[in-house]
Image (cartoon, helix red, strand yellow):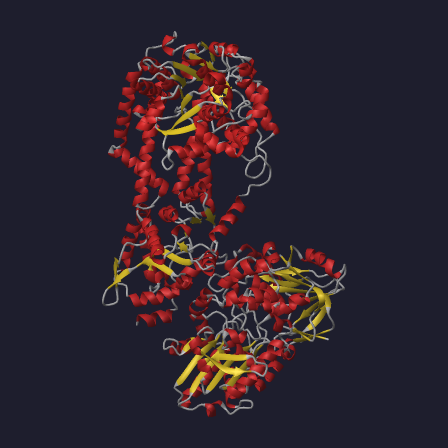
Amino acid sequence: MAETIPASLAGKRIAITGSTGFVGTALVERLLRGIPDCEVILLVRDGRRTPAAKRTQKEILKNDAFDRLRETFGDDFDAKVASRITTVAGDVTRDGLGLNDTDRELWGTADTIIHSAAAVSFDSPMDSAVEINLLGPTRIANLANEMGVTPHLVAVSTCYVAGNRRGNAPEILVSEGPFDIGIDWRTEVAATKRLRSDTDALSRLPDQLKVFRKEARAELGAAGAPALAAKTEDRRQKWVKAELVKAGRMRAASVGWPDAYAFTKALGEQALTDTKGDVPVSIVRPSIIESALAEPKPGWIRGFRMAEPVIISFAKGLLKEFPGVPEGTVDVIPVDIVVAAIIAVAAAGPDDAPAITQVASGGVNPLKYRRMVDNVTGWFTEHPLYDPKGQPIVVPEWRFPGRGRVQRQLTQAKTVLNSADKVLQALPLRGKQAELSAQLEEKRIEVETALEYVELYGLYTECEAIYQVDNLLKIWDGLGAQDQADFNIDPRSVDWDHYINNIHLPSIIQHARVKTTPGASKSVDRMARMRKQVLDPTRHVAAFDLENTLISSNVVESFSWLATRRLDTPERIRYVARTIIEAPGLLRLDRQDRTDFLRHFYRRYENAPLEQIETDAREMLTQLIMTKAFPAGLRRVREHRALGHRTVLITGALDFAVAGLAPLFDEIVAAEMMVRPDGTLSGEMHSVPPTGEARAQILSDYCEAEGLDISNSVAYADSSSDLPLFEAVGFPVAVNPETRLATIARKRGWLVEHWTKADGAPRPLLPISELMVERERRRKFA
Amino acid sequence: MPRPGFVLDVDRSTPPTLFWRGEGFSLERLPADRSRIIYPPEPLAGLDNLDGHIRDALLNPLDMDPLPELLKPDMKLTICFDDASLSLPKMQRPDNRQRIIEAVLDMAAEAGVDDVHIIAALGLHRRMHEYELRHVLGDRIVDAFLPKGYLYQHDAEDPDNLAVIGHTDEGEILEINKRAAESDLVVYANVNQVAMDGGWKSLTTGLASYRCLSVHHNPASLQNTRSLMDRHHSALHKSIWRMGKLLRDSGPKVFQVETTINTEAFPAPFEFLAKREWEWTAKDRSLFLASSKSLNKLPNRTKRKIFHNIEAPYRTTSVHAGFTETVHEKTLENVYKQHIVEVEGQTDILTMGIPFISPYNPESIMNPILVMCMGLGYLFNMYRGKPLVREGGVVIMTHPTYEEFHPVHHPSYIDFFDEVLADTTDPAEMSTKWEKKYAEDEWYRHLYRTSYAYHGVHPFYAWYWGAHGQQHAGKVIIVGGYAAAVRKLGFTPASTMNDALEIASDTVGRSPTISHLHVPGVLVADVK
């Protein structure tokens, strides 16, 4: 080759797909920095909220990969970059790449197209893997052919297209190799489309929908119809996705590939070769891409990639064993070598570039699994991670077990945790005990993640294929001294011990945001900080639920109290016996739908004289409400009041039962019962009792009417049925949460308060009123 | 003839001494040769035919006309009585207040008085439960007056039912219950258990408003009250007596009926509590062992139930009626006759056992603030002349000091403990910084008026009660208390009496002198 790389690409217009990805970002940076005179067109998808051009700014140029360039350009960075980059909105899953006419024209003027967009996740659903990895390259070639242009198309693929095999994997198309079993990509595309619609249809079968609904209810409880509906639909979509992931993995395995990613990439190469027409194509196949050796800076990495989660899980002591053969090769390649190789291929041009270039280390500078493990273990022994209590975590000894054993162990652990979780969810736990369940849930997720790593990445650590890099080395040998200095594409240049210890591990530890210093965790401080936020004078409204939030009582107790107030001992015994018999049914109803339960239950007040009930309710404040109140809760209400916040009580309890709490609140929203002209209660409600999603609506209506900001408000409640209310306000506070809410609060980082009754409060065995003084009772009945 | 109180010097042969520990007790051995135990006088003999004595007092009052002559058919008559904070423990039925009021009502009926109200003189205490009213007044009075609304409880936060009588020479406001203020005659039915009670204090605190009470219920006045049991050296009582003078000059006519009771507080099986330890019989010893062992195994709520169910077999030692000041002088004479023990000089340490009850937790829980109030407020003040412990000396109390509160009776105490004590234990500082917030809290006011809660400001008053003791003592140690709560009170926790003495040695040296105030039994040490 006569020219240098920068000279070959000078003045060229280079179009790039996948620029928001790991390789793509590094590529854009390297082109801007290393090829001073080229122009770059970026094909970026419109985000859900951010348009493509904005994404370029936010997701590419703001990345720390550009720190070096920013430093060089100084204040001119934006101007200089803007003059060389054009962003076009488009999508490789759409025919014609979804470009508008202007962008299409511009796209047509590209001299080189580097296609690095891919669904790199090993567990992509089959359909999206097919759309992106299989059909993506073809669509690019088709567009060029349609427009009658012939840019040099450099397609980034993967070494793993070679599939599960031992021994040498040369730089040839799969179909040209000895192990090809003649899979036709068109058949696969059609089958995947069919699979997609079949799975979707399956997910809509009544029995299946029943399952989703049940799962949604199990997670949210009685959170109200809209929340439940949203969750159910979410479950369905996730199920479809999971089925397609499973289908992809199984299909790939059945025809000899480790996963859908490698499989669809392999077919993608084939499809591109079949449909490229006049467009010259060069394929670049990297192996596992990891953090940068030197460019733009040592250790640069984007996103949490393949080996990182595994390494971090190991350092956290979560992954005690990871399958792999000690003498196996982990084919890792630093990202800057991959990027330089892509640029070198592009610079070589359609005529000189090899049809396929593999960028891998296994063939010429293999990193043995044992060597990597020794390095990782050594490093974490020296720099341990710390558990939340501030104790260093000792990394386990790696015993190179077979994959089956590890998987079996993890599956067992998962089963145990799942059943423990089910038991906890079923128990009527609150507060601190309920937190247990939240912790268990975290553990379960950890195990599940570990299991996934093992299933997916285990294949790669066990891979014994050796990827040939003859073409890569040929390019390397053809480079001049200056190019060799500026564009290192030689895998032999990596000193693995140095790379792992001094470049890769320090970098990923920083990215993983794990605890690397001793000392107890700051979670208590965090709660105090959040409490301060909640009690900020600028808040507008503090909304409170009543039962189990401010008092440890419920509507059944207050009814029982009022109902037994004027009964004598034998009548009381009958009452208690009856209620105990009914209890399971009531509980079931309550779990299904709070509103139905309240309506059903409040019928019991039918024919009760309102005046007498009101008199008795006054006494109930003392005997029931105050003895069961959480003093810290009542204090919090008053703290809010003192700060000038509006305090609102929203409860499904009946208005007369909570009348005694009136001085605490600016507004009490309670259930109201119709009163007959004769002064007795009708047992029917005026309106829907304020429960579930109705509470969110009530609060937002209140705020709107009063000109207050609901997002600047606080809500206190205890149950997952209050989820809509929690989501409506800016500052949710879970009080003594039951298991489901404890889990949700932990996940979403909400303030959790544990309030208790006053120590020393009387604890009557049954929620019935004290026997009236005999004489008094007789007088009242006379 | 009951034996007088005396001071026992502890030597090697002295048996261990009884200490209250809340709902339980322990025997502690005090160091020989430098400790003394102050024993109260034995209970005085009571009056026989009490009803006859009461009738006699009403007909032959001091410095006033006989009651029947004061009663006119068209008059407004108001009868007030001490609330559940007296007596401790509650007395066996019939209560003296019932006897007095029934006698007064009989005379009023004879005179044809129709307009009679009976008011519980609560001050800022919690309202009495109906069963307490029945215990104090008897069913006959309650059934006749309560349903019609003629028997009710004073409400210091009801602006419509308070009346200002005027201001004293020192500018102190006197504001009392309006019905009483507008009555032609107010009869006050009193039970006097200690020298602090009775006299003008009955009416000017029991029927007063918050702003009227805050005039003398404050740190400055209570630090200068030396002691609560010696009204001539009490800033609190001086202020109250000024109000009394105002009441006499400008208020309604007051007919005060005071009774004094002896110290027979414990019925079987607890009589051994009042005996001197070396006189315990084999039966007393086994009762002590059995009861303290079994109490240790019971939960707090059960223990409280047992103790608060105790009804004391008090005997009444005197009844006087008529003009308040004259009556009260006679009352004090009788109270002191029962309580006074002459003691020679002060010691370095004062030890005391804190019982299960104080005036602010009848039928309720002795929370940590009340432990402070009982120890440094009441027991510390059981002196005339000078305190039993020298200034800068150490006070050692025994009490479990659990962090338990009655949610209905003491809601503001809970917040006071969590909020105010976390900030300061200094009475003056909390008074300026926190008192107003609690006193004017709408929620506390609501609970005081409609439920059974002490007024929002009450924990402050309970705390101020100990202000003099707190200022006087160099260190306060609680033996056997829940350490976190004890520290929150600003005191030092100790596990055993020996530990406490060891801790005290930092303040008072290696061989301090010790006085032990022997309760049960009530005594006022006349320290020369």
B313 with respect to B36 (left or right)? left
Q: Position of residue A306 (x, y in %)?
A: 47, 25
Q: Position of residue A118 (x, y in %)?
A: 39, 23
Image point 32% across, 13% down: which residue? A277
Name which quarter of the figure residue A15 lies in: top left
Which image quadrant is residue B327 in? bottom right
Pick the quarter of the image with the C terminus of chain A: bottom left
> Is A395 on the left or on the right of A130, as rendered?
right
Q: Is residue B520 visible?
A: no
Q: Residue at x 37, y 71 (%)?
A: A775
User: Eyeballing the image, is A268 above or below B325?
Assistant: above
Q: Pick whichever, B213 or B152, lies toward us.
A: B213
Work out whether residue A178 or residue B46 is closer to the camera in this orientation and state it: A178
Q: Is residue A283 above or below residue B393?
A: above
- Choose between B526 and A759: the one closer to the eye: A759
Above/below status of A173 relative to B48? above
**Could you tell whether A570 is left or right of B500 in the image?**
left
Q: Quadrant of residue A372 in the image?
A: top right
State the image coordinates of residue A38 (x, y, percent, origin top left). Answer: 45, 22
- The x, y position of residue A403, in whole percent, is 46, 20
